[in-house]
Amino acid sequence: MWNLQRKWFYGTIKCEAKPKNIDTEEFEKYKRGERKTSPAKLNGGGNFTDYTPARLQKDKQEKDLNMLVSGFVDGKLIYIIEFPFNSPDFVKNLEIKIQKWQGKLKGSSSVRGQFLRSADFDYKDYIESPKLEIKYLLPKKELVNYRDYISKGFYKFLESRAK
């Protein structure tokens, strides 16, 4: 997790960055049978590690908290997407993950030392955000070279935005 602040002429915007890198060698290992499961593809997602209900409430109350989601293949930048943390579908996804986790604790509230190990999300949790911005995206003719490392639905979304 990276906490960043972007400064523009109109002030400071707090950003939570979630970069993800795909190692193509892991796909090759899978093809050769040296790996039992297929590696995860870029899906526009990320996760919050050791997340708590209190942290979610704090993040929801932040006025100008944005998410920066980026994807790399072997260290090459493929995309950067920015959207407000408080996008309804994004927050709803996190609330559901926290509620399920609390249910496993038999309804207890957040207890010191107890937290949700991983609250994950993907592009479906923010794609409808009206303030979503593509900050960087490979050109369409180059993006196609990375198609095998990007989930199908997310690739279609990126392709529709690429020039």
Image (cartoon, helix red, strand yellow):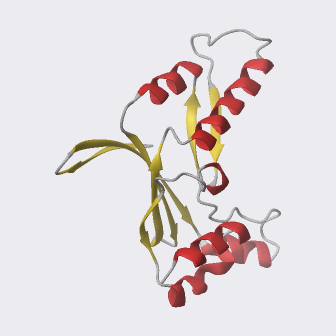
Residue 58: x and y in percent read 46, 23
Give x and y (percent) for residue 56: 54, 27
Q: Nearer the viewer, residue 94 or 161?
A: 161
Q: Residue furthest front?
A: 130
User: Quick one: 122 or 10, which is closer to the camera?
Assistant: 10
User: Looking at the image, which residue sits at the far left?
Assistant: 9
| Residue at figure coordinates x 71%, y 9% from the top left | 108
Query: Residue 1 in the image: x percent, y percent?
Result: 45, 43
In screen coordinates, is 110 left or right of 102?
left
Residue in the picture at 71% in, 31% down: 96
Q: Is residue 85 left or right of residue 127?
A: left
Percent position of residue 25, x then y:
63, 74
Residue at x 79% of width, y 19% of height? 103
Q: Nearer the viewer, residue 153 or 2?
A: 153
Toward the viewer: 18 or 22? 18
Q: Is residue 99 above or below residue 24?
A: above
Quarter residue 91 falls in: top right
Q: Is residue 105 above or below residue 11?
A: above
Number of marks in the image?
Answer: 0
Left or right of residue 132: residue 109: right
Q: Residue furthest bottom?
A: 141
